[in-house]
Image (cartoon, rainbow, N blue to C red):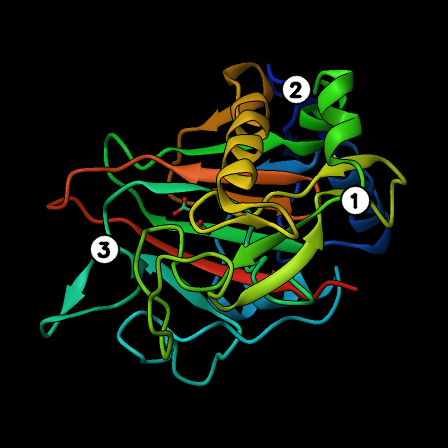
Amino acid sequence: MSEVRVRRVDAVLGAEVEGVDLRALDAASFAAIHRAWLDHQVLLFRNQRLGDGDLVAFSRRFGDLDEAPVQETGQRFVEGMPEIYVVSNVMRDGQPIGSLGSGEAVWHTDMSYLPDPPKASALYALEVPAEGGDTWFCSMYAAWDGLPAALQRRVEALRVKHDGTYNSGGYVRQGVAPTGDPRTSPGTLHPIVTLHPETGRRSLYLGRRRNAYIDGLPLAESDALLDDVWAHATRDALTWRHRWRAGDLVLWDNRCTMHRRDAFDASARRVMHRTQIKGA
Ligand code: SIN
């Protein structure tokens, strides 16, 4: 076994894993990484040299992979690799090679508008700007634990509609007609409070704020309650900010985290490849 070292970052979630080459992991090293991922929610691996095949192979150790959603232009990403989703602002022949552009990507958990969202995402940095484009993570265990007791009681049995109209960059998803009414927009209802199937811990599950709706409440009441819960859940104290270097792989647990990305200079290049591991 290579010597897997797990070092907590200075935040409520997140750890850096050192001493591993993700292209060559034995069973004991993988078991240590899996344990660390459940314990810390987000893992950072620096200095990796991964081709798309390596990224897919590492991700598959956690379970079956989802096919990547089509990009905002309606095109697929990497020929022959349906699992790879490209996050990039780079243009080729007048077309973006990936999704999300160079603007801010707001707080979200991946694909929560689906009935069975992916349990995990792995994002690998190929090219990064000198500044900007940092990705922030937020612990949804800590968000639940830190919610005032009255608010916990209020939301405990409620379900929230996770809107499928917009992605986190604010772009309309392929094939969807945008509507401003969250009660009728496409999406899925999920309980606001969930039990993590592997750790047994309680967590808030909020998805995205835009077009979210608490089932059964008048719209204004739903908005006020969601604003309150979101303000608690995204406090700086619950977050960790990651400044990317090329060769970083970050793996996160969508069941107990959210993430957002800072904007960056549109003339800089940022190219990231992502996989998603099926939930349930
Ligand atoms: C994402 O939201 O999956 C992408 C995050 C990033 O670009 O850092």
For the N terminus, the quadrant is top right
Per the image, the residue denoted by label 3 is: 89
Q: Residues within 10 Å of mark 1 (few under 14, many from 20)?
A: many
Among the two numbered marks 3 and 1 on one chain, the one whose residue lies closer to the N terminus: 3
Where is residue 268? Give x, y as percent. 16, 44
Residue at 87 percent across and 40 percent down: it is 199
Q: Which mark is residue 12?
A: 2
Separation of residues labelled 3 and 1 (CA atoms) = 34 Å
Element at label 2: loop
Q: Can residue 46 be seen in this view?
A: no
Most foreground residue, 217 or 239? 217
Most foreground residue, 140 or 56? 140
Where is residue 51? Give x, y as percent. 47, 64
Q: Residues within 10 Å of mark 3 (few under 14, many from 20)?
A: many
Separation of residues labelled 1 and 2 (CA atoms) = 19 Å
Q: Residue 194 carries which label?
A: 1
Most foreground residue, 64 or 223? 223
